[in-house]
Image: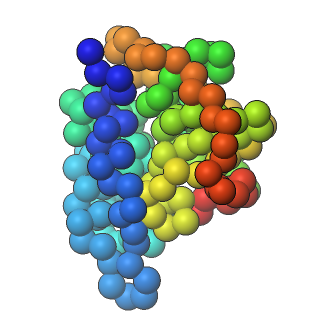
């Protein structure tokens, strides 16, 4: 049995994928985001648009799971699938956060006392793992009908990761 859901493995495979600075854009990133174009409500033409929701959608599509409609909007994910209690989080849970000017969405990979460790897109203009304060969480979700694999991952070290304040 897999230790992590397929969508989280798809996300891990993209770790380090970055936007390109300036007038050029990462065509491989744009193509990946557009694998979920039918759900995103937008078609990506550049890597300057907020893309955290599109990244989550594309990872689910790669795993054969339909994402939320209007997936490009981070807060749309707050109503996706089935709710998951904070005490039942497992790797791959979809976490939705509030932030100044909007929201952010990514995948749970672990937690420490004060923050969730989130694998997501558009975190520092790339796919990365960052720490986001638990107090900012507005929803935790899981694809409906898919069994939850595993449980909470307690991190004893933060691996030098600072606490993120704005993922845009």
Judging depth in this view, the residue of 47 and 91 nearest the camera is: 91
Q: Is residue 20 left or right of residue 13?
A: right
Left or right: 13 in relation to 88:
left
Q: Note whether residue 114 is visible.
A: yes
Residue 51 in sight in this render:
no
Q: Would you say 115 lies left or right of 26 here? A: right
Q: Position of residue 16 (x, y in %)?
A: 39, 62
Q: Please, is residue 66 above or below residue 19 in the view? A: above
- Relative to 153, is 57 above or below? below
Q: How many marks?
A: 0
- Vertical placement of 55 versus 76: above or below? below
**Closer to the camera in the image, 54 or 84:** 84
Query: In the rendering, at what x and y percent does residue 83 appear?
Result: 55, 18
Quarter of the image with the N terminus is: top left
Residue plotted at (23% across, 66% down):
28
Answer with the quarter of the image where residue 10 lies.
Answer: top left
Asked which quadrant contains residue 58, the reply is top left
Tell me which corner region of the image, top left, top right, bottom left or bottom right, holds residue 165.
Answer: bottom right
Above or below for 23 versus 135: below
Where does the image place residue 107, in percent across and percent down from the top left?
49, 38
- Structure colour scheme: rainbow
Image quarter of the C terminus: bottom right
Q: Which residue sits at x=59%, y=42%?
A: 117
Whole-percent x, y for residue 45 in the image: 30, 70
Q: Image point 63% across, 28% down: which residue?
A: 154
Q: Residue at x 37, y 36 (%)?
A: 8
């Amino acid at each position: 049995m897999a230790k992590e859901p397929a969508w989280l493995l798809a996300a891990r495979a993209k770790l380090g994928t970055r936007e390109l600075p300036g007038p050029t854009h990462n065509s491989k990133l744009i193509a990946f985001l557009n694998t979920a174009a039918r759900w995103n409500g937008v078609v990506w033409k550049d890597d300057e648009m907020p893309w955290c929701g599109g990244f989550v959608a594309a990872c689910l599509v790669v795993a054969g799971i339909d994402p939320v409609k209007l997936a490009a909007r981070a807060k749309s994910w707050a109503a996706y699938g089935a709710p998951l209690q904070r005490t039942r989080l497992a790797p791959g849970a979809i976490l939705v956060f509030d932030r100044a000017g909007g929201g952010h969405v990514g995948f749970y990979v672990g937690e420490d006392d004060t923050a969730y460790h989130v694998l997501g897109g558009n975190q520092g203009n790339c796919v990365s793992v960052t720490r986001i304060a638990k107090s900012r969480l507005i929803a935790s979700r899981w694809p409906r009908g898919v069994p939850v694999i595993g449980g909470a991952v307690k991190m004893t070290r933060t691996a030098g990761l600072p606490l993120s304040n704005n993922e845009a």
